[in-house]
Amino acid sequence: MSGLQGSPGGSGGTPWKLEVVSVSKRYMRDGKPLHVLDRISLGVREGEFVSVVGPSGSGKSTLFRLIGGVERPDAGSIRIAGRDVTGQRGHISYMPQQPALFPWLTVRQNIVSALTIARVERKRAVRLAEEWLERVGLGDVAGAYPHELSGGMQQRVSFLRALLMPRDVMCLDEPFAALDALTRTRMQAWLLMQWEASRRSVLLVTHSIEEAVLLSDRIYVLGKSPATVRREIRVPFPRPRSQDIWTDPAFTRLRADILALLEGNGEHDD
Amino acid sequence: MSQNVPLIALGPLLMVWFGFGLLPKMILLVLVRFFPVAWSMLAGLQHAEPQLREYLAMIGASRRQTFWRLELPASLPYFFSGLKLTAAYSFSTAVVAEWLGSGRGIGYFLVLQSRGYKTTGVFAAILCIVACSLLLYGLAAGVERIGLRRLRPGAERVKGGGAA
């Protein structure tokens, strides 16, 4: 078990917003037990961008379902802002892989609807939505319906919806996986800009190493079934960042390291 | 599914229980229309977009919130399409109910004319029935169009009617 030790307020100064403490999860599939997560421990500090990188099928989505309280872990606990919220819903905001916008609501109504679920008063929700749509350059499409927008635009709305929910942690579940390469690169730059302006606590799940390195302060590399934390990596690049770091030799080295870990020839567990 | 069950067979029974007036016919019509619409709406509730359901679960929406914000709007097209499908069917049910036992109405008239071999009368009745069925169907289709445009603007229409 690498990474995170101890409890909030401990060693590092800024408090933990999210702590996943030694969480395990098993499913029964076709009568056989399937061990998905094995004593996963990780955490996100206040104002920190943390990524979880793992091969496909490494239980990343399961991890999110546990954090979101949609499922309960077999062992371990989830703590948000210092409180044990294992199996409780309504403590995170969420951006899924598919934009998950309601087709019968306009862009503005989509955001307002989500905010009211998070108990933001309706008038304030409308004001927030208007103000932020304008601020991120989506003011023109506030009254449009999701199907009138491109995939990239839909994901921007989805991100904004997650950003505006007054929750302690934002969970982004492979938000750009369904986009084409060019749109994806643009979206990463956009997200980087938006996040550096807002500094929310973010947990991003992705299988793109470049994406994780570009965006994160720290990266947890997961191993395959059952998923364990192979290593925790601190990303050395200063902020504000740009996609220029892709040509930095340090970037290339870091990417090669993570790739080696993912491919399994790196069993250095501390 | 329930449209394959010939509810019309209940007609004679309802006549025995409730007489030859309007009541047994109304009951029959309610039965014929209610179940298909209800079934197709139920199917709609279950077919609500799974990734939206997952999203609402992840952000902690309650059951009530999930119903009002997702399930009900998602099942509306099924409701309207059920309404449309049963519109014509309900008219033919009414006609048959009338010829099973009634002293007036278009079904009664049809039977009367055919027993007297009055082809002109029979054709007139058939024409009337066809026109009324089409009118009812058109009315239901109009209600669907307007209803969906009002209640789920922007969303494309779901085709087919679930349980039909």
Image: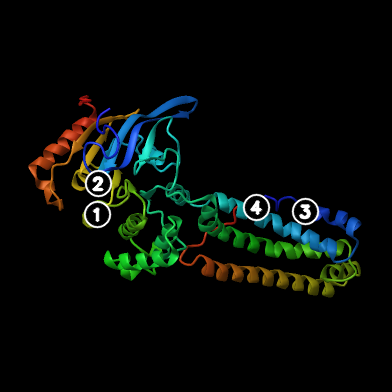
**Helix, strand or loop under label 4:** helix
| Residue B58 shown left or right of residue B100 in the figure | left
Amino acid type at mark 4 = Trp
Q: Earlier in the sequence, mark 1 or mark 2?
A: 2
* Residue nearest the viewer, comparing B96 with B163: B163
Residue A266 position in % (x across, y down):
20, 26
Q: CA distance from mark 4 to mark 1?
A: 47 Å
Residue B39 position in % (x across, y down):
65, 52
Amino acid type at mark 2 = Phe
* Location of the C terminus of chain A (image quadrant): top left
Q: Which residue is mark 1?
A: A195
Q: Residues within 10 Å of mark 2 (few under 14, many from 20)?
A: many
Name the residue at 72% across, 72% down: B132
Chain letter of the residue beneath label 2 in the structure image: A
Q: Quick check: do tags 1 and 2 share a chain?
A: yes
| Residue A160 shown left or right of residue B133 in the figure | left
Name the residue at 91% across, 61% down: B19
Q: Which residue is mark 2?
A: A49
Q: Indicate which label's residue lies in the foreground, 4 or 1.
A: 1
